[in-house]
Image: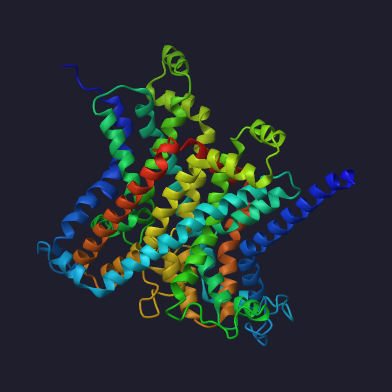
Amino acid sequence: MKQNKVKFAPVLKKIVVYALLIMVAIIMVGPFIWLLSTSLKSGGENVFSYPPQLIPEQVSFGNYVEVMKTFPFARYLLNSVIVTVFTVILTVIFCTMAAYPLARMNFRFKKTIFFLILCTMMIPFQLLMIPVYLISMKLGLQNTYAGMILPNITTAFGVFLMRQAITVVPFEMDESARMDGANSMQILFRILMPLVKSSIATLAIFTFITAWGDFLWPLIIISDQDMFTLPLGLNMLSGTFTSDWRLISAGAVISMAPVVILFLFVQKYFIGGIMKGAVKS
Amino acid sequence: MRPIKMTPFLFLLPGCLILGTFVFFPMLHALWLSFTDYNMIQNASFVGLANYSELFKDDLFWKVLLNTIIYVVGVVPALVIVPIFVAVLINQEIKGAVFFRSAFFLPVVTSLVVAGLAWDLIYKEHGVLNYFLETTGMIDDPIQWLTSPSTALYAVMVVTVWKGIGYYMVIYLAGLQSIPESLYEAAKIDGANWWQQVTRITIPMLMPFIALVSIMSVIAAMKVFEEIYIMTGGGPLHSSETLVFYIYTEAFSNLDMGYASAAGVVLFIFTLILTAINLKFTGKSGNIT
């Protein structure tokens, strides 16, 4: 009797755990599956049929063809890639450079500067969007890649994260390099950066997610359609085809596909990187 | 006096230049603008506290402020609590953990525009949600989730929570994996059941992470914009309009930059107060700065 109970409990627990996991998975992925299903329905099919049909009566790629004809998704994708890649690379470089003296050198105003940098964490971009818009107009950044990139390439989080990472590298590494005649620049880029590459990966992933999904700032600074990123392009598409959900869904699927495919390949690093970020901060 | 060494400042220069141009200067500028009347065509003229007094007299401002508070109160507890359970679930020894983890994280990597559209489709009158609720007998007639003033704000809140669960789940996973297994073994020997283990070991040990998530989610909820822009446009009848949406409309549709900046300053003070309260309550349990 007792033997049975011991065996039974873990099995029941497993069933409950899996049932819950599947339920959560349906809630998290379901909306995307539904989007995909809608995008594959042909013109004759009612998208809002009761009961809803998950499997299209007749799978059709017509909506994709139609959407691609009207919307230059390749161009949007290119813009998104350019903005994201430069934002990530420059964020990593600028934050690491700023972090280096804060972690390794003694100089006047060091504490004040670090404190001021950390203060920027408290200031939401939404408060600043008006003056940032005005200054970007003055600098001629409207409708440029630089306009989308420059305001985002130094973050307090990044400086903080990189400072933490450099602080734990033994100081002997710097000293022996300096004995060999390396200057500060070489020490940072040749010695320290390779040693803190897991923190760099974390920062890159965080920056990637924000830059790729950024919507509000591009919405403000970009009005030229040729400069639209994927979220802006999709927003415009949904405005154009207000009630044609087959086409809107097709557009949404196209615009999310690149990042989903990338994520599925590197999900281990993505999730690992964020876990590291959480422990560090 | 020692001469000031230049090297540290050279390294700090690029980052500080960016922060100076796009954070510190704009911050002072925003404060200045809030005391002016500025429409981008004529020069800004100083009007003292007129924007603020106009703001506090505007019924719509109080409405969006209330909506923002409702948003924070609704979204933050869900974002702090739900991901704990999801993380605990996924942290078990199960087959397919990688699959489930990726599935739960998927909404985080997709843009809010895609997410907003996907949920818009689900919320439609003859959409999946109404069908599900009707067939299970929870409602009698379809609900106009996004187009009726009594539900629009809450319907959008669900999307914010849904989009955030995966992100905070990962933060909690990091926390869970830092808890030594020996604590649970000791508890099992003492005869503690699953619920006791969660409430006596997991939750207390997660406190620093709970503090982090609550600060992050408060700030995120305060500045909600995209979901609302995509799904409801603030409507119907401003029922789902929040503070940032209000600032955006005043600034970029009405070109009332001074007035919008005053609303922005209120948002900032509000965020500061909430973060301070948050730190006071949670700060003692962890070393989060």
Q: Is residue A223 visible?
A: no
Residue B282, given in percent of the width and then of the height, sits at 42, 43
- Tell me if residue B249 comes above or below residue A280 in the rendering: below
Q: Quadrant of the C terminus of chain B?
A: top left
Q: Is residue A222 above or below residue B271?
A: below
Q: Nearer the viewer, residue A87 or B152?
A: B152
Q: Residue at x 45, y 56 (%)?
A: B76
Q: Nearer the viewer, residue B227 or A252?
A: B227
Q: Position of residue A107 (x, y in %)?
A: 27, 23
- Please report the residue visible at 12 percent of the width from the left and 62 percent of the height from the top: B49
**Residue at the farthest bottom position:** A44
Q: Which is nearer the eye, A219 or A206?
A: A206
Relative side of A108 to B37, left or right: right
x, y (%) of residue B165? 55, 55
Residue A200 drawn at (x, y percent): 50, 37
> Residue visible at 32% across and 65% down?
B243
The N terminus of chain B lies in quadrant: top left
Image quarter of residue A219:
bottom left
Q: Quadrant of residue A24?
A: bottom right
At x 65% / y 80%, what residue is drawn?
B137
